[in-house]
């Protein structure tokens, strides 16, 4: 199938324009980012709803039982542009390739744009715990006038390669603060199980990860947490005063239960909103608009 035939929100001319401008006028990306209309980080209600799309750069293309669901770039962009057009969607979290495409499409005006930084710990690799900063750095985020930075911090006490990632995240926190850029840290206690890296989603493990992540860098003034919704979330939120966004996690076949867990966690002190990717842009029933609108209502009607 030709890649342009799947478009529902972006037409064939929009995709052609991206390709042509990338080939003939690469400077147009910087121009689009420079011309982007920015907004305050938090609106009047102090809440944020961000769509995440930084998984492909880590080689994580699967959604549910579809191992290559996110491989089709045209469909991914179409879904993201649709999501960003919906009321209540405050912004997007992604790597430069996706942010650049969305900028060329004019989809980032009045949106909070979050630059994803460390994607080097490729999924399934022998070096996965050495999660190097291979995407945005703080200088690039400032150059492109982005609004937020994001770093993944998986801490494996049995793998010495975690030390380099911890050190790199600390440096990113310090650099972000020096530039006045908010940075969200997504921390997990992780381990090797059956040849894969598995995150411990018990409350005690998340609390431990929060404690470690909160102390990174020379100041915590610009640090946010990005945390999974787990059993005992009340205890987790008692472990930090830092502003926190909830991580949507993997797609669930029980959408009602997923939404209910988010709804409860969004009421807890310190929780400022939600960051969700695959669960909403690739929902089980395929209805991106309905999934995004449902989550948006949870965030903004609290």
Image: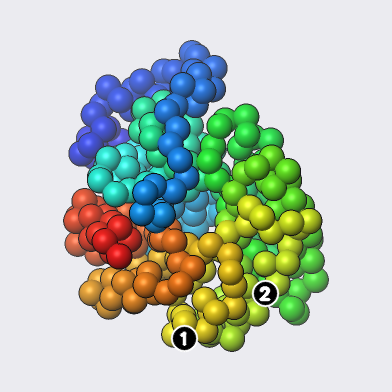
> Residue 209 is drawn in which quadrant?
bottom right
Return the mark for residue 73: none
x, y percentage for residue 71? Answer: 41, 48
140 up-or-down from 261: above or below: above
- Name the foreground residue: 115 vs 56: 115
The residue located at (41%, 60%) in the rendering is: 273
| Label 2 sits on residue | 211
> Is residue 184 in view from this perspective?
yes
Q: Which class describes the residues within 10 Å of circle 1: few (<14), some (14-19), or many (20+)?
A: few
| Label 1 sits on residue | 232
Quadrant occupied by the C terminus: bottom left
x, y percentage for residue 112? Answer: 45, 42
x, y percentage for residue 197? Answer: 60, 73
Residue extending farthest to the top is 24
> Residue 30 is drawn in which quadrant?
top right
The residue located at (40%, 65%) in the rendering is: 248
> Is residue 193 in view from this perspective?
no
């Amino acid at each position: 199938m030709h890649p342009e035939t799947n478009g529902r929100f972006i037409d064939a001319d929009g995709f052609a324009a991206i390709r042509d401008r990338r080939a003939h006028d690469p400077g147009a990306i910087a121009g689009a980012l420079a011309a982007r209309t920015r907004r305050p980080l938090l609106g009047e209600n102090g809440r944020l709803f961000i769509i995440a799309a930084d998984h492909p750069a880590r080689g994580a293309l699967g959604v549910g039982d579809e191992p290559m669901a996110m491989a089709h770039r045209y469909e991914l962009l179409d879904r993201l542009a649709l999501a960003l057009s919906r009321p209540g969607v405050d912004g997007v979290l992604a790597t430069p390739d996706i942010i650049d495409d969305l900028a060329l499409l004019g989809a980032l005006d009045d949106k909070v744009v979050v630059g994803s930084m460390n994607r080097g710990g490729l999924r399934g690799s022998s070096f996965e715990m050495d999660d190097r900063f291979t995407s945005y750095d703080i200088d690039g985020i400032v150059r492109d006038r982005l609004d937020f930075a994001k770093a993944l911090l998986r801490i494996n006490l049995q793998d010495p390669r975690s030390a380099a990632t911890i050190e790199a995240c600390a440096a990113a926190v310090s650099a972000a603060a020096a530039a006045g850029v908010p940075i969200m840290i997504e921390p997990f206690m992780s381990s090797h199980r059956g040849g894969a890296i598995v995150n411990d989603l018990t409350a005690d493990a998340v609390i431990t990860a929060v404690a470690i992540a909160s102390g990174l860098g020379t100041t915590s003034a610009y640090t946010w947490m990005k945390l999974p919704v787990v059993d005992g979330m009340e205890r987790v939120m008692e472990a930090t005063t830092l502003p926190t966004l909830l991580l949507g996690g993997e797609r669930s076949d029980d959408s009602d239960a997923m939404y209910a867990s988010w709804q409860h966690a969004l009421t807890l002190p310190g929780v400022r909103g939600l960051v969700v990717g695959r669960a909403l842009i690739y929902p089980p029933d395929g209805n991106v608009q309905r999934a995004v609108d449902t989550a948006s209502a949870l965030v903004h009607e609290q």
